[in-house]
Image: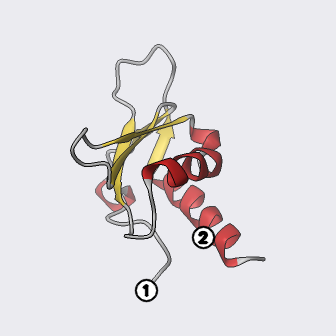
Amino acid sequence: MPNGVANAQRLVASIEAATAMREPTSDSRPARFSVGLRPDQTLHHMTPIIVATLAVFDPLVTPLSELDDRTLVITLRNRVFLQEPGAIPTRAGPPQ
């Protein structure tokens, strides 16, 4: 299995473990997190990759602000974070 596919599978599994389904009529805010881009990455290059990788979560990817397009805010419109402290991830990515 290519490394990128394995990383994507771990990311999806981590999100599923830390979130629950959000009902469309729910007043709960959708799960959101931020991702900092590496120097060789751009908003326009990474947005479709993120959307495709996280498609099952109905993601919305936006820059943090007009002045900071190096930090992306990813909103998972059909997920909410669990309230259990042990279930909330502190970082995403490959294990260290």
Look at the image and tell me in which quarter the N terminus lies: bottom right
Identify which amino acid the numbered label 2 is placed on: Asn
* Residue at the image position 74 percent from the left and 76 percent from the top: 2
85 to 90, vertically: above or below: above
Residue position marked by numbered label 1 in the rendering: 96
Cα gap from disc 1 to disc 2, whole angstroms: 13 Å
Identify which amino acid the numbered label 1 is placed on: Gln
Q: Position of residue 9 (x, y in %)?
A: 65, 63
In this view, the residue farthest toward the top is 25
Q: Is residue 9 left or right of residue 75?
A: right
For residue 66, the mark is: none
Q: Position of residue 95 (x, y in %)?
A: 47, 81
Q: Position of residue 64 (x, y in %)?
A: 27, 43
57 to 8, vertically: above or below: above
* Residue at the image position 49 percent from the left and 40 percent from the top: 20
41 to 67, vertically: above or below: below
For residue 7, the mark is: 2
Kind of element beneath mark 1: loop
Q: Quadrant of residue 30?
A: top left
* Residue at the image position 36 percent from the left and 49 percent from the top: 72
Q: Is residue 7 left or right of residue 19?
A: right
Q: Position of residue 89 (x, y in %)?
A: 37, 61
85 to 93, vertically: above or below: above
Q: Reading the chain from its start, which is encountered first: label 1 or label 2?
A: 2
Q: Quadrant of residue 3?
A: bottom right
